[in-house]
Image (cartoon, rainbow, N blue to C red):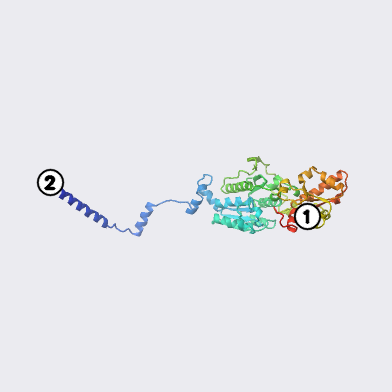
């Protein structure tokens, strides 16, 4: 019993001693370090090396910086680069979107047009609340919210021989995202003179094309096409239609190629043409002819040394807007108002030469559909011959008054060949169904 009491006393003493030590430890203060000692202590704990990119940029662009083909050096190149996108439409929207996201330093946008409802199915940067805005302003507003560090430069002009070089000289790389032949020749020649690579894309219906001109000693546009095609053979998206996703594919490839050129990864498509068939889901590469020594612009002894009048050269306006052909004399044509007031009250037939698909969208009562392709191939011409034999008038109508003029010329040729001289019986509706909607019936749909 005495032994147990003794042990308890010893245990109590040990507990008391430990409690004292705990109190001393809690109240003990470490000696205060000087500022210099504190800094040295911090540096010894948190010492590191970092590239000149900001922490924000490292985080934003990390997924492309870690690629061996890009690296920090490539990101510097992108941030110090300048790219000009000509056309803020179906190709220009995806191209500029990905260039902004990739971190190019300066992005210039050239476009003279405003956003309308028919743009939105393919020009995906624009939105419903952009309708009526200038496209350059609409696209810059949207892209600034994606990457505010990009310097955006607006060029709300129609590119011309007078302003092209002064604009292009400010940039490293040029993207042709337009939809007309005259501007293609203008951009080609200007880029040759300014020694800039030209990344060119086009899209129509389910198909797209893409190549790079004037780069790595490859050909320019004139090397391949020294003479422009006849104006009446050229079809744009407004006339021929296009699937929006096709423009997305081609525009994205243009952005990718620009990134490769800027970061020193060269171009996969200098001297090659990519053909994309969206309907079949196929990509094909075609080797292009080599740079021509006798090319009028980039050859050894060029004959063209200044920018030309490209609208005159191509016989068409430098615009993707509706083209107004002038194939007939004025007395072979009739306005929508005159047709509504007079012609429709006399015996006649009205032939709508649009495609069957377009005819299904909307059509005038009592019109009959003979597509222009059939008329040019001299198919289904019986109605025309029958009407002529009855001494009745024949009126041709299309969307805007271009194909209808071709139909008049073909009808005159066909009936004459079949023994009927009746050129005065054929007329076309000036401005087509578009003019009808604007001037006669506002409820008739525009498309």
Foreground of the two, 362 or 112: 362
User: Does residue 18 appear left or right of residue 385 in this picture?
Assistant: left
Quarter location, residue 38: bottom left
Report if residue 170 is visible in the image.
Answer: no
Name the residue at 63% across, 46% down.
246
Foreground of the two, 63 or 308: 63
Report if residue 38 is visible in the image.
Answer: yes
Foreground of the two, 145 or 130: 130
Q: Position of residue 19 (x, y in %)?
A: 22, 53
- Label 1 sits on residue: 430
Quarter location, residue 144: bottom right
> Looking at this rendering, what residue extends furthest in the left direction?
2
Quarter location, residue 223: top right
Q: Is label 2 in a helix, a strand or a loop?
A: helix
Number of marks in picture: 2
Distance of label 1 from label 2 (alpha carbons): 126 Å
Disc 1 vs disc 2: Cβ atoms closer than 8 Å? no
Q: Where is residue 335 in the image (x, y as percent from the top left)?
A: 79, 56
Q: Position of residue 277 (x, y in %)?
A: 65, 42
Q: What label does residue 3 carry, if any? A: 2
Name the residue at 51% across, 47% down.
63
**Circle 1 residues within 10 Å: few <14, some 14–19, many ≥20:** many
Q: What label does residue 15 carry, if any? A: none
Q: Is label 1 in a helix, a strand or a loop?
A: loop
User: Does residue 389 appear left or right of residue 323 in this picture?
Assistant: right
Q: Position of residue 157 (x, y in %)?
A: 66, 58
User: Does residue 238 appear left or right of residue 32 in this picture?
Assistant: right
**Circle 2 residues within 10 Å: few <14, some 14–19, many ≥20:** few
* For marks 1 and 2 on the same chain, the one whose residue lies earlier in the sequence: 2
């Amino acid at each position: 019993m005495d032994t147990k009491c003794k042990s308890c006393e010893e245990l109590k003493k040990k507990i008391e001693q430990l409690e004292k030590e705990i109190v001393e430890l809690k109240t003990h203060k470490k000696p205060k370090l000087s500022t210099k000692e504190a800094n040295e202590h911090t540096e010894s704990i948190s010492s590191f090396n970092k590239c000149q990119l900001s922490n924000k940029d490292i985080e934003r662009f990390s997924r492309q910086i870690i690629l061996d083909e890009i690296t920090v050096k490539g990101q510097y190149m992108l941030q110090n680069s300048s790219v000009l996108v000509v056309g803020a439409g179906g190709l220009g929207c995806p191209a500029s979107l990905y260039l902004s996201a990739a971190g190019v330093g300066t992005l210039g946008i050239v476009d003279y047009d405003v956003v309308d409802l028919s743009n939105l199915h393919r020009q995906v940067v624009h939105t419903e609340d952009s309708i009526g805005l200038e496209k350059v302003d609409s696209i810059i507003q949207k892209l600034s919210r994606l990457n505010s560090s990009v310097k955006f430069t607006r060029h709300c002009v129609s590119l011309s021989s007078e302003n092209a070089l002064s604009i292009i000289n400010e940039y490293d790389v040029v993207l042709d995202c337009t939809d007309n032949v005259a501007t293609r020749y203008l951009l080609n020649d200007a880029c040759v003179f300014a020694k800039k690579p030209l990344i060119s894309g086009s899209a129509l219906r389910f198909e797209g094309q893409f190549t790079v001109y004037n780069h790595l000693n490859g050909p320019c546009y004139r090397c391949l096409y020294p003479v422009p095609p006849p104006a009446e053979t050229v079809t744009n998206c407004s006339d021929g239609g296009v699937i929006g996703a096709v423009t997305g594919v081609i525009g994205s490839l243009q952005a990718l190629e620009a990134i490769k050129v800027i970061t020193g990864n060269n171009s996969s498509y200098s001297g090659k043409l990519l053909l994309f068939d969206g309907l079949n889901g196929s990509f094909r590469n075609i080797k292009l002819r080599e740079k021509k020594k006798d090319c009028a612009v980039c050859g050894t002894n060029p004959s063209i040394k200044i920018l030309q009048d490209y609208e005159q050269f191509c016989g068409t306006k430098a615009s993707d807007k509706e083209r107004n052909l002038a194939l007939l004399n004025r007395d072979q044509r009739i306005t929508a108002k005159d047709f509504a007031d007079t012609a429709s009250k006399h015996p006649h037939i009205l032939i709508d030469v649009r495609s069957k698909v377009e005819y299904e969208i909307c059509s005038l009562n009592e019109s009959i559909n003979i597509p222009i392709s059939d008329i040019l191939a001299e198919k289904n011409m019986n109605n025309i011959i029958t009407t002529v034999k009855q001494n009745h008038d024949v009126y041709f109508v299309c969307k805007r008054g271009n194909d209808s003029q071709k139909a008049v010329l073909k009808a005159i040729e066909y009936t004459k060949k079949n023994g009927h001289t009746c050129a005065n019986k054929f007329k076309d509706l000036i401005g087509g169904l578009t003019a009808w909607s604007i001037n006669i019936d506002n409820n008739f749909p525009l498309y």
